[in-house]
Image: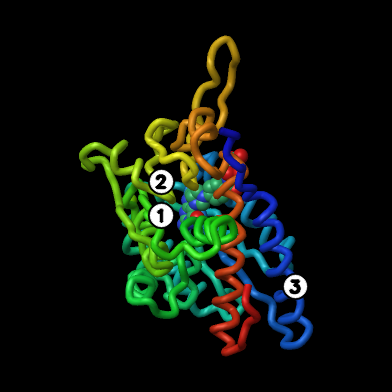
C-alpha cells in the first residue's frame, strides 16, 4: 500500500488566515472596527513565550490589534483577576486568552471563570463548554476546532464514522468528542484507564491522539486507511549520536504513515490550525459583540 496522505496544516491554516484577514479588512473599512486580542502570559516558561510571540505575530499579520500582557511568575492571583476584569471592560479587546499552564499558586479554573464568556476565545469558560455540549452559540476551543476543519476538508461528511479520541482533557479531548458527535460520528473517548486501547483504536475511521505521550500510538493499532489527527507536541532528545531536541507527536509517525490513509505531521499539522482558529474566534467574538453578521469562514 502507498503511504498516507500528509494533511498539511500549514497550508490549510494559511488559507484560513487569508479569509480571516479579508473579513477583518472589511470590518475596518465599513465599520471602523478592528478586532483586538489580549494574550496574558504569567511567568517565563520558554515554550509559552514562543507560543505567545507566534500568536502576536499572526494576530498583527491578520490586521487585528494584539495586546500582550507579560506578568512576573510571582504575580498574585488577585492581580491577574484585576487585569482580566479590566480587559473584560475594554471595548478594544474582543478576545482574551490567558496562556496555560499558570504558576501553581494561581487557580487556573478561577481565572478561566473570570473571563467574560463573550471574550473567551479559548472556549474554556463553563458557559462556552455548556453551549458546545448543548449545541448552542459557543466559542469553541481552538485545537479541536482546527482538527475538525482538517477532518472535514479531508473526508467531507463525517456522518456514521467511528471516531476514537484518545485523551479526556477539557482543552482537547472532551470538546473534540463533542464536535465529532455534532458531526454524527460514533464517538469513543479513550484514556489512561481504557482496557485494550489498541483494540479500541483499531475500530476507528478517525483517530485523534491527544495524550501528551511521545509516539504512544503505534502503527499496528490503526485500521488501514484511517485518518489520524496527531495533537501531541512533545519535545524529545534526538537519537544518539545527534544532539539537541526534535518535536514528535503522540503517534509513531514512521509506522502510522504506512498504515493510515491520511495523517497530520508534527510540526505542521494541528499546531498552526490552533492559532488560525484563535484568530477566527477573535473575529467571531468581535462580530457578535458588535451585533454584526459574518460571512461563513
Ligand atoms: N490558553 C491557552 N490556549 C492555547 O491554545 C494554548 C495554551 N494556553 N497553552 C499552550 C498550548 C499549546 N498551543 C500551541 C499553539 C500553536 C502551536 C504551533 O503553532 N505549533 C507549530 C510549531 C511548533 C514548534 O515548532 O514549536 C506546529 O505544530 O507546526 C503549538 C501549540 C496553544 N496552547
Ligand atoms: Mg494551578
Q: Do the residues labelled 2 and 1 touch (CB within 8 Å)?
A: yes
Is residue 99 visible from the viewing direction of this image?
A: no
The residue furthest top is 241
Q: Name the residue under label 3.
A: 22
Residue at (65, 64) in percent of width and height: 66
Residue 238 is situated, as x and y percent measured from the top left of the image, at 55, 20
Quarter of image, res 179: bottom left
The answer to whether 253 is drawn above or below residue 75 in the figure is above
Judge by depth and name the residue closer to the eye, 41 or 132. Answer: 132
| Tag shown at residue 172 | 1
Is residue 13 visible from the viewing direction of this image?
A: yes
Structural crowding at the residue carrying mark 2, measured as other residues with C-alpha within 10 Å and reported as few (<14), some (14–19) or many (≥20): many
The answer to whether 19 is drawn above or below residue 191 in the figure is below
Residue 236 is situated, as x and y percent measured from the top left of the image, at 49, 27
Residue at (42, 50) in percent of width and height: 205
Q: Earlier in the sequence, mark 3 or mark 2?
A: 3
What is the CA distance from the residue labelled 1 to the residue labelled 3? 28 Å
Q: Are marks 3 and 2 in contact (CB under 8 Å)?
A: no
What is the CA distance from the residue labelled 3 to the residue labelled 2? 32 Å
Q: Earlier in the sequence, mark 2 or mark 1?
A: 1
The residue furthest right is 29
Q: Mark 2 points at which residue?
A: 210
Residue 167 is situated, as x and y percent measured from the top left of the image, at 34, 47
Q: How many marks?
A: 3
230 lies left or right of 127: right
Amino acid at each position: 500500500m502507498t503511504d498516507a496522505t500528509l494533511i498539511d496544516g500549514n497550508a490549510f491554516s494559511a488559507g484560513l488566515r487569508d479569509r480571516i484577514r479579508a473579513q477583518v479588512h472589511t470590518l475596518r473599512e465599513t465599520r471602523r472596527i478592528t478586532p483586538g486580542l489580549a494574550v496574558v502570559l504569567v511567568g517565563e516558561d520558554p515554550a509559552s513565550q514562543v507560543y505567545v510571540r507566534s500568536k502576536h505575530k499572526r494576530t498583527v499579520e491578520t490586521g487585528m490589534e494584539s495586546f500582550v500582557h507579560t506578568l512576573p511568575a510571582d504575580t498574585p492571583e488577585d492581580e491577574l483577576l484585576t487585569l482580566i476584569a479590566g480587559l473584560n471592560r475594554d471595548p478594544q479587546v474582543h478576545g482574551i486568552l490567558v496562556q496555560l499552564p499558570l504558576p501553581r499558586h494561581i487557580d487556573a479554573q478561577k481565572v478561566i471563570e473570570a473571563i467574560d464568556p463573550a471574550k473567551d476565545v479559548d472556549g474554556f469558560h463553563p458557559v462556552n463548554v455548556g453551549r458546545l455540549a448543548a449545541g448552542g452559540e459557543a466559542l469553541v476551543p481552538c485545537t479541536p476546532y482546527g482538527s475538525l476543519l482538517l477532518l472535514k476538508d479531508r473526508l467531507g461528511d463525517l456522518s456514521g464514522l467511528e471516531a476514537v479520541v484518545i485523551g479526556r482533557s477539557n482543552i482537547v479531548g472532551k470538546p473534540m468528542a463533542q464536535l465529532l458527535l455534532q458531526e454524527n460520528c460514533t464517538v469513543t473517548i479513550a484514556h489512561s484507564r481504557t482496557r485494550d486501547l489498541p483494540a479500541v483504536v483499531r475500530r476507528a475511521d478517525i483517530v485523534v491522539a491527544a495524550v501528551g505521550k511521545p509516539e504512544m500510538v503505534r502503527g499496528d493499532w490503526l485500521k488501514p486507511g484511517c485518518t489520524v489527527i496527531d495533537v501531541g507536541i512533545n519535545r524529545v532528545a534526538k537519537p544518539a549520536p545527534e544532539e539537541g531536541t526534535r518535536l514528535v507527536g503522540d503517534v509513531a509517525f514512521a509506522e502510522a504513515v504506512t498504515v493510515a490513509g491520511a495523517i497530520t505531521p508534527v510540526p505542521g499539522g494541528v499546531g498552526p490550525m490552533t492559532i488560525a482558529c484563535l484568530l477566527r474566534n477573535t473575529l467571531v467574538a468581535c462580530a457578535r459583540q458588535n451585533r454584526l453578521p459574518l460571512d461563513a469562514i
